[in-house]
Image (cartoon, rainbow, N blue to C red):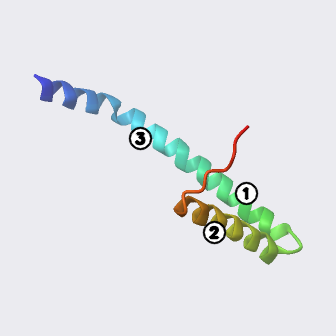
């Protein structure tokens, strides 16, 4: 009975998962295309990309070192 209930629930929620994942993927694609277009139109695209990469590296290092920034 429990297996049938779980299977029925999975079948019932499958379209919700597909639509939800599609919406999230579509949003990320739209934002990535807008970012790429903005970077292409700037006067200094290498500087923008270097800044983004730098922020990601700093965030990764702080996460690995388990640094907690103060909060108010």
Residue, far right: 43
Label at residue 25: none
Residue 6: x and y in percent read 21, 29
Give the quadrant of residue 15: top left
Residue 19: x and y in percent read 46, 38
Q: Where, quadrant-wise, is the N terminus in this rendering?
A: top left
Which label sits in the foreground, 2 or 3?
2
| First in residue order: circle 1 vs circle 2 | 1
Judge by depth and name the residue closer to the eye, 57 or 23: 57
| First in residue order: circle 1 vs circle 3 | 3
Judge by depth and name the residue closer to the eye, 2 or 56: 56
Q: Which residue is mark 2?
A: 57
Q: Secondary structure at mark 2?
A: helix
Vertically, is 31 above or below 18? below
Q: Is residue 12 left or right of residue 4?
A: right
Q: Which residue is mark 1?
A: 34
Categorize mark 2 by other alpha carbons within 10 Å: few (<14), some (14-19), many (20+): few
Q: Which residue is mark 3?
A: 18
Residue 57: x and y in percent read 63, 68
| First in residue order: circle 2 vs circle 3 | 3
- Residue at point 79% right, 69% down? 48
Residue, far left: 1
Disc 1 and disc 2: Cα gap in Å?
22 Å
Q: Where, quadrant-wise, is the C terminus in this rendering?
A: top right
Q: Is residue 44 left or right of residue 69?
A: right
Vertically, is 1 above or below 22? above
Q: Is residue 35 left or right of residue 47?
A: left
């Amino acid at each position: 009975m429990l297996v049938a209930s779980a299977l029925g629930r999975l079948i019932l929620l499958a379209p919700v998962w597909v639509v939800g994942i599609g919406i999230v993927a579509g949003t990320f694609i739209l934002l990535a295309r807008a970012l790429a277009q903005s970077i292409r139109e700037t006067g200094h695209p290498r500087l923008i990309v270097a800044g983004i990469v730098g922020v990601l590296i700093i965030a990764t290092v702080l996460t690995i070192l388990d640094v907690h920034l103060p909060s108010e």
